[in-house]
Image (cartoon, grey):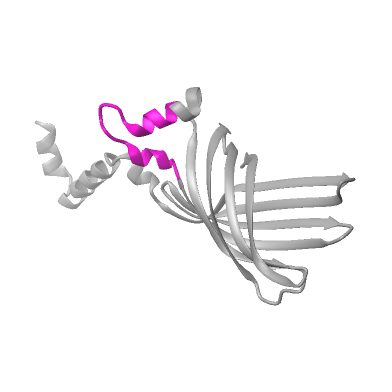
Amino acid sequence: MPVSRLLARFVPPTFRALLCLIGLLSALPAMAQEALLEILPLRPFNFDIALRQQSFAPDDREITLQAGVTALRYGDGEVRLGYQYFSIHTDDFKTDQHAVFLNPRWNNVVDLLDFPASMPINRLLRHILFGPLEDRAIPYVGALIGTVLSAQGRTSPGLLYGGQAGVRFPVGRGISLDLSLQFTQYEVNFRGESGESQQWLFLTGIRY
């Protein structure tokens, strides 16, 4: 007796429908399975620190610290929560600034240029920019929006905003090397005066 007749005779219609549904779901592209909303996955973490102590011309000490976790992730999009501490102490002045910001970013951004079919622009850019690492590189762009507070008398926090571009290279399970260029502009109080400051940071570190 053919298998189809055996199924029709001994397997209930509801169970047959369930089998068909399972078959259809298993045939969906892997991308559809990966595009799930993750809330507070936390990883990858990042922690970057720069320390400088100089004894002459000028005599000062500088500390920059930045840390972050992943708050949301959906496919190639994610939102990170970051904190930055920036401090300069000299004989003449000192400033300590604390910033908290959201960092929405889009990973594999060049893959949006997956056309034309004969020579996709994204493959060409990956080959030019990353050479033999083109298939491992994860380029991204992001924005930053948050607030900054100076310890020198400002009573209200100032607005912080900016952007970033970078690339991440996975080097092991859950570990990657991250290189990025970040620009921020923010309102800050310095020596009793309020104004806007611009900051460029080149960051490199391990994300895990």
Is 198 positioned to the left or the right of 62 in the image? left
Look at 26% across and 39% down and name the residue there: 27
Q: Residue furthest bottom?
A: 155
Look at 48% across and 24% down and name the residue there: 131
User: Number of labelled discs?
Assistant: 0
Instruction: Give the percent coordinates (x, y) of residue 195.
Output: 66, 67
Front one among 136 and 96: 96
Whether residue 30 appears in this view of the structure is: no
Whether residue 94 appears in this view of the structure is: yes
Look at 13% across and 33% down and name the residue there: 3
Q: Residue furthest front?
A: 57
Look at 66% across and 62% down and name the residue there: 99
Where is residue 187, by image quadrant?
A: bottom right
Instruction: Give the percent coordinates (x, y) of residue 69.
Output: 59, 53
Where is residue 181, by image quadrant?
A: top right
Whether the magenta-drawn stretch holds residue 9 is answered as no
Instruction: Look at the picture and state if 129 lies above or below 32.
Output: above
Whether the magenta-drawn stretch holds residue 112 is answered as yes
Instruction: Give the percent coordinates (x, y) of residue 202.
Output: 63, 43
Q: Which residues are magenta?
A: 107-127
Quarter of the N terminus within the rendering: top left
Quarter of the C terminus within the rendering: top right
Is 28 positioned to the left or the right of 132 in the image? left
Q: Residue furthest top?
A: 132
Instruction: Look at the picture and state if 154 lies above or below 116.
Output: below
Is 51 positioned to the left or the right of 161 in the image? right
